[in-house]
Image (spheres, helix red, strand yellow):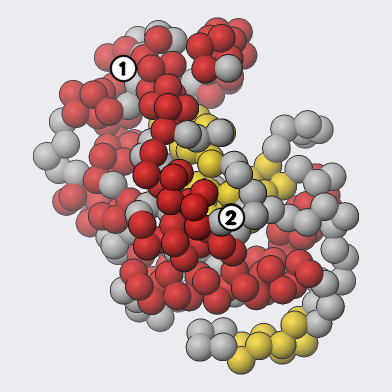
Amino acid sequence: MTERVELMTYVTCPTMRYHPVVVAQKAATVQLLSGGRFTLGLGSGENLNEHVVGRGWPAVNLRHEMLVEAVHIINDLFDGGYVNRAGVHFRVDSAKLWDLPEQRVPLALAVSGEQSVELFAPISDHLVAVEPKAELIDGWRKAGPRGDRAIGQMPLCWGPDRDQAVRVAHEQFRWFGGGWKVNAELPGTSGFTGATQFVRPQDVADSIPCGPEVAPIVEAAREFADAGFTDLALVQIGDATQESYLGWAEKELLPALRQELG
């Protein structure tokens, strides 16, 4: 059980499997239960997850349009009162959040390029991205979000044996190198297998910090800091070393990141 750490979905899609009214209700509940520590991360979804409800997989422009409409619904519900809407993609009939948290749930939207930045910044609080691109941050701030946090995601594979860590990262995370625009379109695990069949362990090691050393992780994190990101989520690949990794991160990694990056 946590008492201080922030909580966040990283990220959920409120357009196909889950109706935006349902997402808003769940977010408000988590905010109440956590004492105001929750941020709702939202994105336009991935084919792998969303196609299962039998509605097909829309083109990216349509997915962005659906997400904008969904975010307006969620924001309206967070404002309080009844919400009714007959939109292009969603209908809402007398929806109301009966228990609103004292602290409004911040919205953090995932972006990957100029179009998503321009569309999502004006209707959200914070940015989420998986690549340390300064142009995303610059465009986001110019587009006028309500907040100023830019939250990055960076994978790493810590372990006492670097070669083993590289093998684990290659087995479980080699799809990361394909980029968001590719990964979002793949409909199943066979697609990911085909798209990554020529990715070598060395390719993964060149793009993801692997092994027991602090310095490569700090160096990779610096790219996000230099690009203007204010927050960074570190994703430890592999489940066999999570407890050991957390102990190591507390004693060695976090102090080094604070010293080097502030």
Give the answer, above or below, for where 26 lies relative to 129: below
For label 2, the SS is: loop
The quarter of the displayed image where residue 212 is located = top left
Q: Do callouts 1 and 2 mark residues in contact (Cβ within 8 Å)? A: no
For label 1, the SS is: helix
The quarter of the displayed image where residue 209 is located = top left
Q: Please state if 189 lies on the left or on the right of 63 as rendered.
A: left
Q: Please state if 3 lies on the left or on the right of 208 as rendered.
A: right
- Report the Cα–Cα distance between label 1 and label 2: 42 Å
* Label 2 crowd bin: few (<14), some (14–19), many (20+), radius 10 Å: many
At which x and y percent is residue 11?
53, 52
Residue 145: numbered disc: 2
At which x and y percent is residue 137?
45, 44
Q: Residue at x 19, y 29 (%)?
A: 203
Q: Which residue is mark 1?
A: 164
Quarter of the picture containing the N terminus is top right
* Label 1 crowd bin: few (<14), some (14–19), many (20+), radius 10 Å: some
At which x and y percent is residue 226?
42, 27
Q: Amino acid at mark 1?
A: Gln
Q: Amino acid at mark 2?
A: Pro
Residue 123 in view (yes/no): yes
